[in-house]
Each structure stands twice: as C-alpha cells, then as structure tokens.
Amino acid sequence: MPSKEAMLAPMVRKLALRSAIDEDDKAAILALPFVRRAVDPSTYLVREGEPPTRCSFLAAGYAYRQKLTSEGARQIVSIQIPGDFIDLQNLFLGVSDHNLQTLTRASVVDIAVPALRELVLSRPAIGRAMWIDALVDASIFREWIVNVGRRDARTRIAHILCEFALRLKAAELGDSERYELPMTQEQLADAVGLTPVHVNRVLKALSDEGLIQREKRSIRVRDWDKLRSVGDFSERYLHLHADEAREEFGFPGTLTA
Amino acid sequence: MPSKEAMLAPMVRKLALRSAIDEDDKAAILALPFVRRAVDPSTYLVREGEPPTRCSFLAAGYAYRQKLTSEGARQIVSIQIPGDFIDLQNLFLGVSDHNLQTLTRASVVDIAVPALRELVLSRPAIGRAMWIDALVDASIFREWIVNVGRRDARTRIAHILCEFALRLKAAELGDSERYELPMTQEQLADAVGLTPVHVNRVLKALSDEGLIQREKRSIRVRDWDKLRSVGDFSERYLHLHADEAREEFGFPGTLTA
DNA sequence: CGGTCTCTTGAGCAGAGTCAATGAACGTGG
DNA sequence: CCACGTTCATTGACTCTGCTCAAGAGACCG
C-alpha cells in the first residue's frame, strides 16, 4: 500500500503542469481527504441524474463520458485518460448531466467535494490549474461537435486517432508511433457518431492504405502526416502548452479605450 | 450614455444568479476596467489562432461560436444570448481555438483579462459564479455532441428549438410560447450539422404538423409537449437552477472511507 | 471445449446531401 | 414610391454516404 502522499502525487504533478504550485499549495493538496479505489471495467463512476458524491481523479486506467438518447443510442462525449480529473463539474453543479464509465480496470482517487472546492476557490495557483483543465476539456468538446457534425466518416476516425496519439503522448503513455487504445470498435463508433460496422470498414481502409496498423487493442501510426491530413487535424484545440502560453503573451492588459 | 455602473449591472445580475455576491464583490466588479462597444451583425469578436486580447460579456444581441473544417464546412458549436460571458476561455488559455461571431447587432463589454482573472481567483463568490457558468457551457457542449452525433434530423432540430426556448425564457427574453430566433436556416443548419435544404424541409414538417409556427425571425411553439418529445429533450443539461442545487444537497462531504 | 464478445464482410436500403431553379422579403437609391 | 439587387426560403429530382440486417470467423475465458 503506497503512502497517502504517493497516491496524490500524480495529481500534484498534473496541476503543476498547468500552474506554478508552491509548497503550501502542495501541502494543501496532500491534506485533502480522499479515498483511492480500484474499479473494474465498465463500472459506472457517475450516473446521469445523480447528485454529486465526490470529485475524482483518474490515477490509472481509461474512462469515458456518455449520454443515452431516448431511442437507446449511446453517444460517447469524451474519453478520459490517466491523469485526468473526471468529475470537475461536480465541484459546482448539482446534478450530473451524463454518465461516466470506466473503459478498463482503473484506479480512481475520490476527493471530498467541499474540501476540493474550498481549495480551488481559496488557492489561486490551484484554482488556475483547475480552470485550465476545465477549459481545455471544453475546447475538446467543441472540437468533437465539429468532428461529428461536419466531417465524413473517414475524416472523423482519422481525427480521433490523431487526438488520442497526441493526448497519450502528452501524458507519456505512448508516442505518435504507437499507443494503446483500449476501446472496442463499437465504443469508437459511439464516440464518432457512426455504426460499428462502418467504423470497421473505415479502419480497414486506413489500414489497407498504410496509414495505421491495428494491433489487438493498440494503434500503430504508419504515416502520421497523412493521417493528420486525412483527419483534418490541428492540435491547437488540445492546448497542450496551456501552461506556457499565458506567460509568453505577457497578459496584454491594457484596453485601448 | 449610461454610467459605467449601469453598463456593468447586467453582469453583476448574472453573477448574482449563480452565487451569493456581496457588496465587496460587487464593488470589485464595478471597479473593473472595461470598454463597451456596439458591434454590427456578422462581426468577428475572436478569431481562431489569435491570442486573447480581452474577455467579453454579451450585454445585448446574439452571437455564436464557430469552427471551420479544411473543406470549408462550418460548424456552429454554440449560440450565445444576452447575458452570456463569451470569452471565458481567454481567461486562462493562450490561443483561441474557435471563432466567435455576432449574429445580430450587439453590445459587448470587453474586460481586461488580467483584472478579471485576478477577480476570479481572489474572490471566491465571483470565482464560483464563473465556474458555474463555464461548467454549464461545457454541459451544453456535451449535449450538442449527442444531438449531432446520435439524433436524426427531425429530432435534432426539435431539440435545439427546445433548448433555445428554455434558455431564452431563463434570460427573460421570451417564454415557451414564443421567442426570437435571429438565425437564418443556413446558420441553424450549421448548428445541427445538416444542410440548409434539409433544415428547411424539417422545419416545414414541424410547422405542418402544428408543433411550431414560424414567423419572420422568431418561433412560436404550438405544442410544447410534443416538440419536447419529438426533440428527445430533457432540460437537465441546462442546469437552469445551478444556483440552488448545491445548497439543497448540503454538499455531502463525508467520504465513507 | 463451449460460450460470449468482438471483428469482418456482403447485400440492399434510406436519410440526408447535391444541384438547381424559383419565389419572397427587404433595403437602397433614384 | 418603385425598380433593382441581394439575401434568404422553398421545392423538386436525383445521388450517395453511411445504416440495417445478417451471417460467419476469430479471440478470449472460465
């Protein structure tokens, strides 16, 4: 059993990536009341309609956010990878508006909502880091609307494959060469708004053309430039360097009024 | 020319809806450096790729967020109505990932980013209100992914019409009977991921069936229950009572660990 | 070794797109 | 006050991308 401190370390690291966390901030984080638990694949972490019971950090494993239509169709609205906060909206909203489910076996750190909320509001460096996290999430949602709304099947799938490549690389869980993608084709289909059958055909085509190579539950990218181009992919929306960005611009504060 | 105070009043009102703003908070808001300007329809307020120059509040008029694909297709990812903060992501992100354009003539209050950021991080009540705002935005993005990804044309359009009805009602700009919708069918098409031609046909069908009635640039809802049902609409994702919700639940803080 | 998922592939279908033409509404300037 | 240009809405005819249904093949697990 690792120490409490070791369990929260990945979270500190994540926040430190986004904002300058000092020793006091770090201590405050390590003092948070939390529980770590191991979770089986396909377990619901949050259900739509439930009041929030906790705010969680995904220490290991994969998860996804999902909503169901009255017809029973499922749309996956985001994929969460190790190192993601997965319940930020619980911090300030009263009822969950979507389902959150594990994709794989996972390790989740549940943090008491009031304590975390207090931290976010009272410690600017932490608040800032969490803000960036939430805003990047929102940016990814926007891109997904575009992906699903205005791109054809081939482009959509290439796009999401590029997104995973870069996000996993940024999380040091792969590179643009090869990465783990623990999703079935049915789940992939629900993420891009297509049917599993059609996803299968498109993946085969991308594979036949030498853009990617499919291995059990991972993807090898054979031709990044072409995949990127087929997928109409630009990484801007991932804000991978959100930490540096603001400093560079020096916060132009003067309004020419 | 209204006083500076009068110009910021709608913003104070909006924040007060979401969190308990006290006199000091109010004073701090009123002390913000800002500029108000009138903007023509179809004006770009933010362009993708630009560094943020300001953070804005939409005091009057309508706007939308939009992204273009390399094929030249446009996807509208959100519609903003009077009383919305329209540049929250500029607060902490370095480069804009989408375009923001006015739909109608509008009145925009531009606030200096550093001052607002400071306010958000240092005044918990204001920070909380802004958090709620950002999280509700994200929730709407999620619902739009579902709308565009998993619903057929008829359902999609009925859904978005329901969304507007409730959001405008909440902003006291209409009721579930009738509201202003200053969008062309082409813009509506770009918001729901369809073609203008098809949107036209579906609107006609909804109209012929007596669910709605179209007037110049406004919508009269003739049969709310049926529209809601056709649109697979549930208002939960709008978090219209985000202000009350958290209090009701008393922030269950105890983790049974 | 049987059962259950997941992946593949084929055949036919249909919802939404494309192309194109016409009509209505509106603002502007003569 | 009317003619004109522009933008937006409407409708028809035809096409095509992605869906449905269905069956078979692997892969994995107890």
Image (tube, coloured by chain):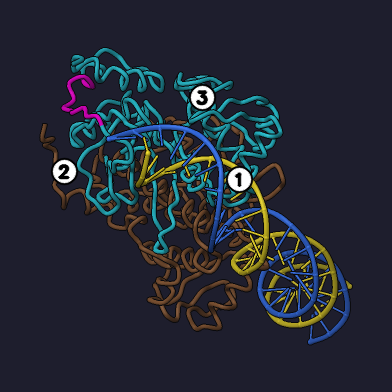
Chain colours: A cyan, B brown, C yellow, D blue
Q: Which of marks 2 and 1 is nearer the N terminus?
A: 1
Mark 2 vs 1: CB contact within 8 A: no
Quadrant for the N terminus of chain A in the image: top left
- Mark 2 Cα within 10 Å, few/some/many (few <14, many 20+)? some
What SS does tag 1 mark? strand
Residue at image location 11% in from the left, 37% down from the top: B254
What SS does tag 3 mark? strand
The front one of B57 and B191 is B191
The front one of A67 and B92 is A67
On the same chain, marks 2 and 1? The answer is yes
Q: Quadrant of residue C5?
A: top left
The numbered disc on residue A179 is 3
Residue at image location 23% in from the left, 35% down from the top: A117
| Label 2 sits on residue | B251
Q: Mark 1 lies on which chain?
A: B
Give the residues in magenta: A28-38
Magenta region includes residue A36: yes
The front one of A176 and C30 is A176
Quadrant for the C terminus of chain A in the image: top right
Q: Which of marks 1 and 3 is in front?
A: 3
Mark 3 vs 2: CB contact within 8 A: no
| Label 1 sits on residue | B67
